[in-house]
Image (cartoon, rainbow, N blue to C red):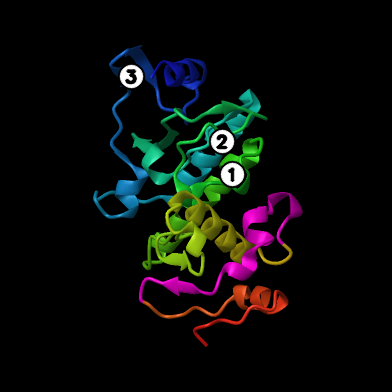
Amino acid sequence: VETEAQWLKRLCHHKNVVTMYDFTRQGLLLERADFDLYSLLHHEVDAEFPMVRYSADLFRGLAFLAEEGVCHLDIKPENLLITKGVLQLADFGTAVTEGEESMGGHTPCYRAPEIVLDLPCGPASDVWSACCVLYEMLTCCEGHGPFYLFDLENHWLLGMEDLEEDDDLKETLTHLFLMEQVIGHPFPTQMRDPTFFHHRGALKHVLWHQGRKEESFLGMLMEEDGVKDEND
């Protein structure tokens, strides 16, 4: 609480950062929000959805953090509050100074590659997460979502028998695989994780939650490594 209070004390004068009035060991005293973006996207509240304005507020807030040399590192709909029609950044519990490594505690679907791989973070780390949020907003406005850009729960990498009990590593490898699917080939060298990219032959295929096989770029990787899919 004290760490987050110090961040807010420094930053909350900006209109796109939640206002803090006071703090104690028991918690923070913040301006009361009307709702958060998650509630709006998931139709838990009945309110206007000015996507362009909210998006502008989000990136305006991130530009301010970049000027201050601060990385939020947990940008997600639950941490974006709507107060009197203005979107504000909240929950600075994982924030770091630009150039530092993440301290953990992030939401998997929104993590930038450098957070996944424990590399130094910068403003681009928050922009990555914000774009994931923007994707959810777009799919919601189209009447189909919200959908996650990186839906870790509905994808699972199989054939990793030695990792069956290591859910964190499975999550990391799945996230990196989906990132490569979105970004395309070649994946940036500095973002390659040796556990996945040097031993990718152990991965057999990707299953969706419906139980159907999804043919993808992984098939080409398997062919390069001379791996036969036992399910074919």
Q: What number is the disc on residue 172?
A: none
| Residue 29 seen anywhere in this rendered image of the structure | yes
Q: Circle 1 sits on which residue?
A: 127
Amino acid beneath label 3: Leu
Residue type at mark 2: give it.
Leu
Badge 2: how crowded within 10 Å, few (<14), some, or many (20+)?
Answer: many
Is residue 204 part of the magenta span, yes or no? yes
Please name the residue shown 64% across and 76% down the image.
222
Q: Element at badge 1?
A: helix
Residue hosting label 2: 62
Residue linked to disc 3: 28
Lateral position of residue 183 relative to residue 138, left or right:
right
* Quarter where residue 66 is shown: top right
**Amino acid marked by disc 1:** Val
Quarter where residue 29 is shown: top left
The residue nearer to you, when weighing 188 against 92, is: 188
